[in-house]
Amino acid sequence: MDADRLIFACAMGVEERIARRLGPTVRLGLGAANGIPDEGRLVSFGIAGALRPGLEIGTVIDATRVVDENGEVLWEGPPLGIEPARTGTILGAARIIDDPPERARLHESSGADAVDMESGPLARPGRLAGCIRAISDTPDRELAGLAEGARANGDVDYLGLARGFLRAPRETARAARDARRALKSLAEASLAMPTRRRGGLAATPSNPGISER
């Protein structure tokens, strides 16, 4: 993997902080609400939810395919080569998927192993170079109130998080622990990438959101 030529695209600030050790980053927001850079080869980087049993919290997927809800291939390519990771297929969804029966239905219809909201929009322009995702929630360990804790721009929604915790305190606290475990796995995976040179594509007028800090 030539990290110098990649932009690591993340939904949330906590993911972006991990990605910065690898090269230039851009914060997309949930579902790429902040927009996608006009130039550069992109890596979808962050956490995802498992669609099927057998994927434990913290499992890292070095995806070789991104599909839509019907299984149509939006992107296909080789893995980036992270040794601790497993290959798999990511579903690019337009909404948060947390209901266990819906996870099972989407696994059946798409063949995907896990779901996020950013890989689909990133795949459609044809510049996706890879997809690294750590499992933060599963069919039997749901997001619960944690799903209310993020704003569309990728910032933490503390009021939403508080509402979610009041609605389901035990489940939300567990989901927060699971998310921290997934982020730890993502950080460890970033250290195992074959090439970790800093630098990469510089920010340009057409890529105002790219950070190299």
Image (cartoon, rainbow, N blue to C red):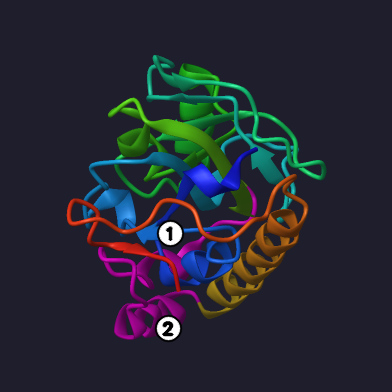
Give the residue displayed 59% in from the left and 58% down from the top. Answer: 22
Query: Dot 1 corresponds to which residue?
Result: 25
Label 2: which secondary element? helix
Report the front residue among 89 and 107.
89
SS at circle 1: strand
Look at 45% across and 59% down and name the residue there: 24
Left or right: 169 as drawn, with respect to 182 = left
In which quadrant is the C terminus drawn? bottom left
Quadrant for residue 124, please give it: top left
Q: As drawn, which residue projects farthest toward the right? A: 84
Q: Is residue 158 magenta?
A: yes
Point out the stretch of residues depicted in magenta: 140-168
Q: Position of residue 131 (x, y in %)?
A: 54, 39
Q: Residue at x 46, y 28 (%)?
A: 106
Say which quarter of the image contains residue 191: bottom right
Q: Position of residue 168 (x, y in %)?
A: 48, 74
Relative to 25, residue 118 above or below: above
Label drawn at residue 166: 2
